[in-house]
Image: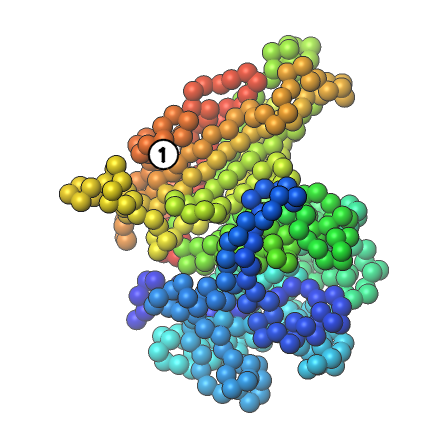
Amino acid sequence: MPDSSEVRFHPIIYVRGYAMTRGEIDATTADPFCGFNLGSTVFRVTPEKNRPAKKFVFESPVVRLQSDFEKFKYSDVFKDGLDIMDPSWTGAITRQSIVIYRYYEQASTLLGVGATPDIEDFAKGLSSLILRVRDLVCQDPNNNVSPATFRCYLVAHSMGGLICRAFLQNPALGADDARRCVDKVFTYATPHNGIEMGGINIPGWLSTKDMDNFNRKRMAQYLNLEARFNETGRVDWLPEAAFPSERFFCMVGTNRGDYEVAMGISRTFSGHGSDGLVRIENASVWGMNTDGTVSAPCPTAYAYRSHSGHFGIVNSEESYQNLVRFLFGDVRVDIWVDVEEIQLPANLAGEGLKDKVNALYQFEVLASPRGKPWYLTRRIAEEDSVACRTHKELSDSQNKDAKRVYLSTVFLDKRWRVKPSQDSPNSTQNSPDPRQDSLAYSMTLGVRVPDYEVDKKLRLDQHYEGGYLFRDSVILEIIPPPKGGSSWKITYDWQRDNRGPRDIPIDPKTLQNSKVEVKIPFPSDGPTTPGMSGNLRFVLSGWNT
């Protein structure tokens, strides 16, 4: 029988994004990996494009999946010049296979007929590919997999994520046997709620080059969401009955400035708060119960990356780290802010003014694991990626949902933990640091309110541009329960208070489905004026257990 770590390693099926022109379709047809093999050597530290880029070598998702895992190395499935969907292909494949869904091949002038099928046909083709992969994996007895136990991962960029959703959500587009094989889905920069240019959704009549694939009414048809779309006007819904939202990850790009497609015209019309093509607010998905209520946000992370290109989201360290932790990690952490009280400036807190205040509160978050030079998630105001609430929403005592702000989800993995060095002040040869078995990461929370309005007039007498109502970093140290156990050991400390060991223990609250919840109050030294107080709330659970 495979050991507990081996069962995480399923075939990865990569589904590329949209190709507009015939030249782009032919180019992706001529590329065996459809772009999944592209790396990068540059990244942006700040949103100031006039500052030079920094060097950071990321080899590509394909290369890293082949080199990062000593025991379970991934490999491609090309053999003797053939792909597994070619009629002449023979043999079995390993469970650690990288499979490329080459759906544009049939649309190319190189290997196809030069006519692009509908997105529904691409979804059906994905179903057929999954079943083909299942059969080839099950042929090899060394894989310890049967048709009933076979699972795979779908990893998709841009429109590829819509193909995956169409296959999963629409019963008419593929086989139920194939849908049951999908264990997790990871999407990069997918327009889950369509594409907008100049603030207007792509019109349904714009069928040229299949651009209507991003029109919400058209999307509602192939995503099997027409009734929900008529109620909400949105299509970023994932019915829990079709696929569990907790196993569907959304990687969101926030760098519009480096998206150079169409000589920069795309980023101009997509506007601020986008990756140059897809608006941030349209790049994630929400789970939906059978009664139409919202179940939960799908796990989501943010990176200062553009839709594609040298600074693109697929060829980035940040996205890759989220990918492998989501697929293979040990611990899941959902990050929320629960707002309890808002303190207005003294000159606005009187009875005659406080009910007239209009303000937009911006929540920033930066999260990074111990010892790494990149963020697992990054949401800051200058990159238009913050979570927002209005003063009216947060001051309404009846609006409980508005006071619960989802920020992001991070996954941690014991394989990549950084152990304190032997010369650390907290560790000696004779007295090893007990934190060596822990998973730790830093999370910075910032709360901004750019300005206050009263009767539509700005009140700037107590305004400081770029200032924060609250900003501090908390270090969270996590020791998951041992195998078969249920006891979590969690400590923390705010860095403003203590830059040393995290020694404040938290007593986790047990939730359903083997999850635990911990709350950390902020600010740690009591409320300020103006200011905000509440709790950072972390929902933790074992992952791949």
Q: What residue is drawn where x is 65% and y is 13%?
A: 348
Tell me residue 523's x, y (percent). 46, 24
The quadrant in which the N terminus is found is bottom left
The quadrant in which the C terminus is found is bottom left
Residue placed farthest to the front in the image?
52
Amino acid found under the numbered disc labelled 1: Tyr
Residue 417 appears in view:
yes
**Residue 323 sits above or below residue 397 on the image:** below
Q: What residue is drawn where x is 64% and y is 76%?
A: 30
**Residue 54 sits above or below residue 472 on the image:** below
Tell me how many marks there are. 1
Q: Label 1's element?
A: strand
Q: How is the image coloured?
A: rainbow
Which of the pair 214/436 is nearer the observer?
436
Q: What residue is drawn where x is 67% and y is 24%?
A: 451
Tell me residue 346's x, y (percent). 60, 11
Residue 235 appears in view:
no
Residue placed farthest to the bottom in the image?
88
Task: Say whether residue 200 is left or right of residue 408.
Answer: right
Question: Where does label 1 land, which residue?
Answer: 492
Q: Quadrant of residue 448?
A: top right
Which of the pair 323/244 is nearer the observer?
323
Tell me residue 299's x, y (percent). 52, 49
Tell me residue 201's x, y (percent). 77, 51
Which of the pair 227/505 is nearer the observer?
505
Q: Quadrant of residue 459?
A: top right
**Residue 270 sits above or below residue 424 on the image:** below
Residue placed farthest to the left in the image?
430
Q: What residue is drawn where x is 76% and y is 58%?
A: 262
Q: Quadrant of residue 24?
A: bottom right
